[in-house]
Image (spheres, rainbow, N blue to C red):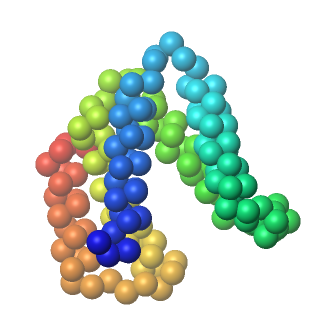
Amino acid sequence: MKQEYIPFIVAVLGGIAYQTSQKLMPKVVNPLLALAYVYFLAFLVCLVYVIINKDINKDITIFTQLKWPMVTLAIGTLMIEIGYLYAFRYGLPLSSFGLTVTGSVAVILLFVGLFAFKEHMTIQSLIGVFFCILGLVLIKI
């Protein structure tokens, strides 16, 4: 297996676990408290990983180099979590909600990459945008 496939497989499996878990979150649980608990567990897993790999001394500099992308990443992550959690609490379908969000994000990020990061758009990208938009229309956002 090519090494480039590993992040894709990890992200797909994580996406499946993520959305399924969000859908199964009990409605009686306070959503922000549930997210705090989830983030605490994720923090512990990351901390254990760093300690096991003995990288803690060189990685401790992250706290002295806190930059705005880390803050916006935290805010964006929280917005995604809250969006999915409430979508499923309101009864939106697991089968299409994630697809419409991902398709919408993909189309918007193509233009963000083009204008903010000076990435190049190819004919294949334009065709992909067309099919993403067509898919969103067919799903009836």
Where the N terminus falls, by quadrant?
Answer: bottom left
User: Against 80, is 62 above or below?
Assistant: below
Residue 75, image x and y in percent?
63, 49
Q: Which sits in the foreground, 67 or 21? A: 21
121 vs 66, left or right, is left
Q: Which sits in the foreground, 108 or 53? A: 53
Residue found at x 58% / y 20%: 30
- The reply to whether residue 62 is in sight is no
User: Against 6, is 103 above or below?
Assistant: above
For the image, the number of numbered tags is 0
120 vs 73, left or right, is left
Residue found at x 47% / y 79%: 115
Residue 5, image x and y in percent?
33, 69
- The reply to whether residue 2 is in sight is yes
Where the C terminus falls, by quadrant?
Answer: top left
Residue 128, image x and y in percent?
22, 70
Residue found at x 59% / y 35%: 38
Q: Residue furthest top?
A: 28
Residue found at x 73% / y 62%: 54
Residue 39, image x and y in percent?
63, 39
Q: Residue furthest right?
A: 64
User: Against 51, is 68 above or below?
Assistant: below
User: Against 92, is 106 above or below?
Assistant: below
